[in-house]
Image (spheres, helix red, strand yellow):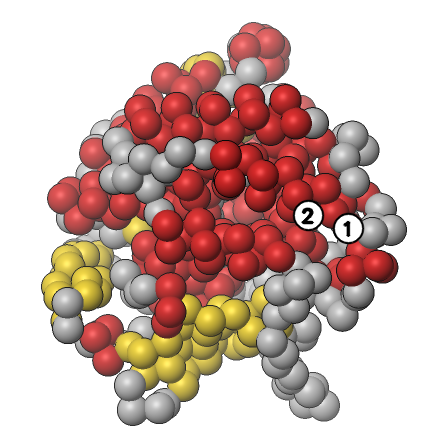
């Protein structure tokens, strides 16, 4: 097995990640999975079951789905299970009283689960900004990160990447788009010219502004290609998800926003592309199956055999289109927030989380999601180069302001 030594070196005034490979032999990789009851968490456990003993789970963490996490705990036998919700933790403690599994609660419990000496890699599959603090704690403890929580880099990208560099810890992306870019990158990333992120277009690709005014929750939750959690499915429908991914790519790969493009690719076969300075373009293709990038993040730099369905390109047509920024203005807003930087991306993300939650509860119309997020962003006084406390303060302000507008 090998592990990553991630450094940073400059090229033409810009910073590029440099990946060096060192030999390191070990038979087992031990995981903490944050967000184990969500879509990515469940699929991560499926990867664990198919890993032929190469992966072991030390801890599971979730919000309050007691029934499912009990099933998961009895299946993989972790040492620790963490519930963010206090009542859920109390109930789970009773349910698992016949086992030796320790049940912990809250952010303190989550942080304890990621810094444990037994843990090699932390899978951050939480939804929302809540992933920022445990990710920083894991990096401080020298853990590798399999990153499926894009909001962590949106809210605190500068802070997180600086911590990863200081601690020499790898951050390996799990999002299918960023995994694709990661797989396409050469050993010499200063030859990189442009990152091309693909987007399915969601359920409303090609819809007019008038048609979007009549979007219902049921329609917005019908993603044509991917099976995801409710929040990310709505973000995909508005294309805010792709905007968050643009900001994430900026931090992960140290590429400026002028060299990150988005193309609509309705078939979701090409997961993203990389164009090099000689004009060559490399693309990563695969089934719309999140287990593939999850497994790659956990097995890197090797590729484990698995029984998952293979891609068959016979008879397929692949198409690519420019995104409609008028019909889906959230993508343009994310570019603006990313370029401005500071606390603005955290504010945009927080406002979006609250607005999407209101939409999921039928308390807000589809088009109003963007309107409210944009207004909160316009009212925010941006603080540059924020520390964790300032990011959390900005996040709290944005959530409060969004609730006022709602």
Q: Name the element at disc 1.
A: helix
Q: Is residue 104 left or right of residue 157?
A: right
The residue to which callout 2 is attached is 234
Whole-angstrom CA distance, mark 2 to mark 1, is: 6 Å
Q: Quadrant of the N terminus?
A: bottom left
User: Where in the figure is residue 181, as x and y percent of width and height?
Assistant: 40, 69
Q: Closest to the observer: 342 or 252?
A: 342
Q: Which mark is residue 379?
A: none
At 67% from the left edge and 74% from the top edge, which residue is drawn? 267
| Mark 2 / mark 1, whichever is N-terminal | 1
The residue to which callout 1 is attached is 220
Q: Quadrant of the C terminus?
A: top right
Q: Is residue 224 above or below residue 51?
A: below
Tally the marks.
2
Q: Is residue 379 left or right of residue 236?
A: left
At 78% from the left edge and 60% from the top edge, which residue is drawn? 209
User: Where in the figure is residue 164, as x and y percent of width and height?
Assistant: 22, 45
**Residue 258 visible in the picture:** yes
User: Where in the figure is residue 83, as x and y percent of width and height?
Assistant: 51, 20
Q: Quadrant of residue 136?
A: top left
Q: Is residue 117 left or right of residue 348?
A: left
At 84% from the left edge and 59% from the top edge, which residue is drawn? 210
**Residue 38 visible in the picture:** no
At 21% from the left edge and 33% from the top edge, which residue is drawn? 141
Q: Quadrant of residue 321?
A: bottom right
* Contact? badges 2 and 1 (CB < 8 Å): yes
Q: Quadrant of residue 116?
A: top left
User: Where in the figure is residue 46, as x and y percent of width and height?
Assistant: 55, 49
């Amino acid at each position: 097995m090998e592990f990553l030594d991630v450094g940073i070196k400059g090229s033409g005034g810009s910073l590029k990640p440099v990946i060096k490979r060192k030999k390191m032999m070990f038979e087992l990789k031990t995981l903490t999975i944050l967000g184990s009851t969500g879509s990515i968490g469940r699929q991560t456990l499926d990867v664990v079951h198919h890993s032929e003993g190469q992966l072991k789970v030390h801890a599971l963490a979730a919000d309050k789905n007691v029934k499912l996490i009990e099933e998961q705990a009895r299946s993989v036998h972790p040492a620790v299970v963490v519930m963010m919700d206090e009542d859920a933790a109390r109930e789970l403690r009773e349910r698992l009283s016949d086992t030796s599994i320790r049940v912990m609660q809250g952010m303190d419990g989550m942080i304890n689960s990621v810094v444990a000496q037994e843990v090699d890699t932390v899978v951050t599959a939480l939804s929302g900004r809540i992933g920022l603090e445990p990710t920083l704690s894991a990096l401080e403890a020298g853990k590798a990160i399999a990153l499926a929580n894009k909001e962590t880099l949106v809210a605190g990208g500068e802070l997180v990447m600086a911590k990863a560099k200081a601690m020499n810890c790898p951050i390996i992306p799990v999002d299918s788009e960023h995994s694709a870019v990661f797989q396409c990158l050469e050993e010499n990333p200063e030859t990189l010219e442009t990152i091309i992120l693909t987007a399915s277009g969601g359920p409303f690709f090609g819809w007019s502004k008038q048609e979007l005014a009549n979007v219902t929750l049921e329609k917005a939750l019908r993603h044509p290609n991917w099976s995801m959690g409710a929040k990310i499915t709505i973000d995909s429908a508005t294309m805010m998800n792709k905007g968050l991914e643009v900001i994430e790519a900026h931090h992960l790969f140290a590429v400026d926003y002028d060299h990150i493009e988005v193309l609509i690719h309705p078939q979701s076969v090409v997961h993203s592309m990389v164009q090099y300075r000689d004009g060559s373009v490399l693309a990563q293709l695969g089934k719309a199956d999140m287990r593939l990038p999850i497994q790659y993040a956990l097995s890197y730099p090797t590729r484990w055999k698995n029984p998952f369905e293979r891609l068959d390109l016979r008879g397929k047509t692949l198409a690519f289109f420019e995104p409609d920024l008028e019909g889906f203005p959230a993508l343009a807003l994310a570019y603006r927030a990313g370029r401005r930087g500071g606390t603005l991306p955290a504010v945009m993300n927080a406002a979006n989380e609250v607005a999407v939650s209101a939409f999921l509860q039928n308390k807000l119309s589809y088009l109003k999601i963007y309107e409210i997020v944009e207004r909160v962003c316009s009212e925010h006084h941006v603080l540059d180069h924020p520390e964790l406390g300032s990011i959390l303060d900005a996040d709290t302000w944005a959530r409060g302001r969004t609730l006022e507008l709602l």
